Image: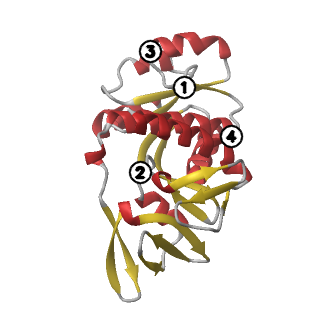
Amino acid sequence: MIRCVAIDDEPIALSIIKEYCERYGGIHIECFTSPLEGMKYIRGTCPDLVLMDIEMNSHNGIELARALPQGTLLIFTTAYAEFALAGFNVNAVDFLHKPIFFPRFCQAMEKVAVWLSGRNSKNDYPEAISLKVEHKNVVIKLDTIKYIEAMDNYVKVFRKGLPTIVSQITMKEVEAALPVQRFKRVHRSYIVAMECIEKFSNRRIFIEGESQAIPVGRTYNDSFTSLYEAFMLSSRK
């Protein structure tokens, strides 16, 4: 789960960012129209990521960026493209030019995921998740999961050499519990383990040991491709 804070003095801009975060999945976001309140919250919580407008009525986002806690990733959001260079000079991960469209937002989030992946060692990842199966909790080791399929308000967890597990949980909830560096939602009905991908095309993914291909949703294609390429590069290091 990526902990995110958005600061923008335009409520409509914040509502779009919040909608995009919910649509993307795996992001917990807090929004502020007041730069001072937003910065106070950031100093108290040290989030993973800050999305910040540059030209606000009372404050300049570039100046505020210099006061962010060390290690906090930054993405600027602004209607003024001429500020891009100044934004990168304060080590912004990306620069989103308004109006922001969802595919471009996804590209920025994939950059964030790669940065977080490189910053954290594999030992920092959770090793397992707990899912309710019938009337008991079952611990599932992450390295046994191949992919997950949605079935209404249930999910089916397909595992390596182990029985499939069916749990009464939504796809959104299980997605939020999984580390974004290792698992990616590629379709409204499917989440795949990156390390179990054998090959893929624009519209299909083949999982090791599985004959049936998993479809890639049109809205997920670009974000999946960029993250998988980054994953493969990092795994070769």
Q: Pointer 1: residues within 10 angstroms few (<14), some, or many (20+)?
A: many
Q: With respect to residue 3, does 56 lie above or below?
A: above
Residue 18 visible? The answer is: yes
Residue at mark 1: 94
Nearer the observer, 140 or 37: 140
Query: How crowded is the residue under tag 3: few (<14 C-alpha within 10 Å), some, or many (20+)?
Result: few
Spot occupied by residue 55 in the image (x, y as percentages of width and height): 58, 19
Please state which of the two labelled residues, at mark 3 or mark 4, is closer to the viewer: 4
Protein image colouring: secondary structure
Q: Is residue 11 left or right of residue 26?
A: right
Q: Return the mark for residue 90.
A: 3
* Alpha carbon distance from label 3 to label 4: 25 Å
Question: Please, is residue 202 above or below residue 196 in the view?
Answer: above
State which quarter of the image contains the C terminus.
Answer: top left
Residue 34 vs residue 131, the one in the foreground? 131
User: What amino acid type should be assigned to the residue bearing mark 2?
Assistant: Met
Residue for point 52% across, 67% down: 148
Label 4: how many residues lie within 10 Å, few (<14), some (14-19) or many (20+)?
some
Q: Quadrant of residue 108?
A: top right
Q: In this rendering, does residue 59 appear at all? A: no
Q: Earlier in the sequence, mark 3 or mark 4?
A: 3
User: What amino acid is labelled 3 in the image?
Assistant: Val
Tally of numbered discs: 4
Q: Give above or below for 77 relative to 17.
A: above
Depth check: 158 or 7 in front? Answer: 158
**x and y percentages locating residue 98 in the rendered image:** 69, 28
Viewed as shown, does residue 30 lie left or right of 185?
Answer: left
Instruction: Kindly check if marks 3 and 4 are in contact, taking CB atoms under 8 A apart as contact.
Output: no
Name the residue that disc number 4 marks: 103
Secondary structure beneath label 2: loop
Q: Secondary structure at mark 4?
A: helix
